[in-house]
Amino acid sequence: MRTEKRLFIFALAILTAGGCDDSWGDDGDDEHECATPSRPIERASGALSNGRFEWICVENSDPTCGSRVFPLAVAAGARFSLDFRTSSELPAGVGDPMLSAVGASLVGGDGTGFSAPLPGVATVVAVSEEAAIDFIEVEVLSVTRLSLSRTLPPPEPNEWGCTPGAPSPAEGERADLVVGDSFTVQVMPYAGSTRLGGGLDYTWESLTPDVLVVSNPGGRVARLDGLSEGIGQLVVRGGGHEEVFDVRVDAAPIPDETESAGTDGSTGGEDGSTGGEGESTGDGGTTGGEDGTTGDEEGTTGGEEGTTGGEETSGGSK
Amino acid sequence: MKGRVLILVAALFAAACSPSYDGLRMTVLEGASTAEVDSAGIELVHGRVVVFEARPVSSVDKDYEVSDTVELESTDDGVARVEPGVLVNTWMMFGVEPGDTEVEVRINGTTEDRIPVTIVSASEGS
């Protein structure tokens, strides 16, 4: 297998990376929706427009959790559930539908949820005792890429519960880790450029535990702690795919003593070098704690898209 | 003798007033674009669904009425399953497993036809 490493650099600011996620569409149900590009509505509606299929995330490793959207495709090996709401325009006599999967790429149905063992196209049908009401095709794709993005503290939601664009690193800015600092990241599975839905099992491992420590409270979120200066290597595995990410851990920044020390001049600069390290460690610990708290929240809530931001980066496939 | 003639005439008259099955007119409405649906045979990819309208065709001047009951039933639900749709004369067929089966066509309770069905694997159908 080929191993390719890329620096874990947050390069571009994505204004839409905040409260309303950019790639998952919405099906236009709510009166006040976050302004996002929507995926075609017929993907959530049944093919016959006799009702609507609703995606239900069953575990917090599913990136659709909290996003109220129907993914374009499902990751092979993923787990999810669906619900179906019959159109009110249909006669009452059509009965209550049960959902079931047709095809080898998808198994399961009502009550048990669905799992997607194989890549391919499968169909979920809504059938009552009286009639076949509707169906939806589900594309199951193998994970070909994992992407990491740094999670940021959630911005305040507006009156409709939509969060505006979250603060992101400015263009060209590197958001590398600093010794003594920490932040949380979340992984997103892709097939090419298509984001994949469904819950997957992820494992996280630091290949350089002396430089970088990774802890995964669950789901697709992990906390990174910088221990010492250097290039830390992080392995993320999920959906039968694994990627290696390099995370640069920089030395703690040295505070400008000329500003804080007032008129101390050149002597203050030397003092600042020593004092700066001590202060940075302390600051880093404080910052790390805050980020860690955010990360824990992300994990608990299933990594709601609305609370995340930052840039995504791809690692090297293995 | 006269009575027998009258009965024969009545029978002929009744036959002339009843439709005579001459196949199904099938039209795909939705579903797998690769599906082939025809009264001569149906081919569908495993894991896919096709929705079609099926109306019986009469070989005589008398056409089938809405009140005539049309039923389609797969002889092997493990290969292909067919269920009535929400709209009149519409049907949904599922490609359950690769293989061959038949759809039995019953009109007013009488089996009139058997349509061969082939469910092909996804690799064959793509």
Image: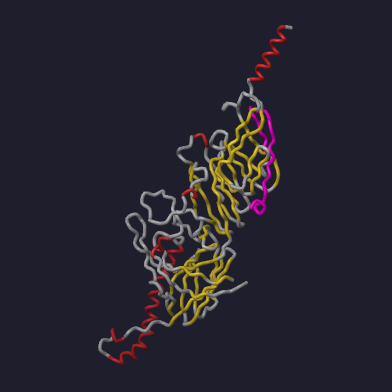
| Residue B125 located within the stretch drawn in magenta | yes
Q: Quadrant of the C terminus of chain A?
A: bottom right
In terms of image quadrants, where is residue A166? Answer: bottom left
Q: Quadrant of the N terminus of chain A?
A: bottom right
- Residue A202 percent coordinates (x, y): 54, 65
Q: Is residue A47 above or below residue A95?
A: below
Residue at 36% x, 64% y: name it: A155
- Residue A174 percent coordinates (x, y): 42, 75
- Residue A223 percent coordinates (x, y): 47, 71
Residue at 56% x, 74% y: name it: A4
Q: Is residue A272 above or below residue B12?
A: below
Which residues fall within the magenta stretch? B102-126
Left or right of A193 on screen, residue A175 = left
Left or right of B86 on screen, residue A267 = left
**Residue A243 or B32: which is nearer the viewer?**
B32
| Residue A219 located within the stretch drawn in magenta | no
**Extreme-right residue of the structure:** B1
- Residue A176 percent coordinates (x, y): 44, 76
**Residue A180 or A144: which is nearer the viewer?**
A144
Q: Is residue A135 above or below residue A282?
A: above
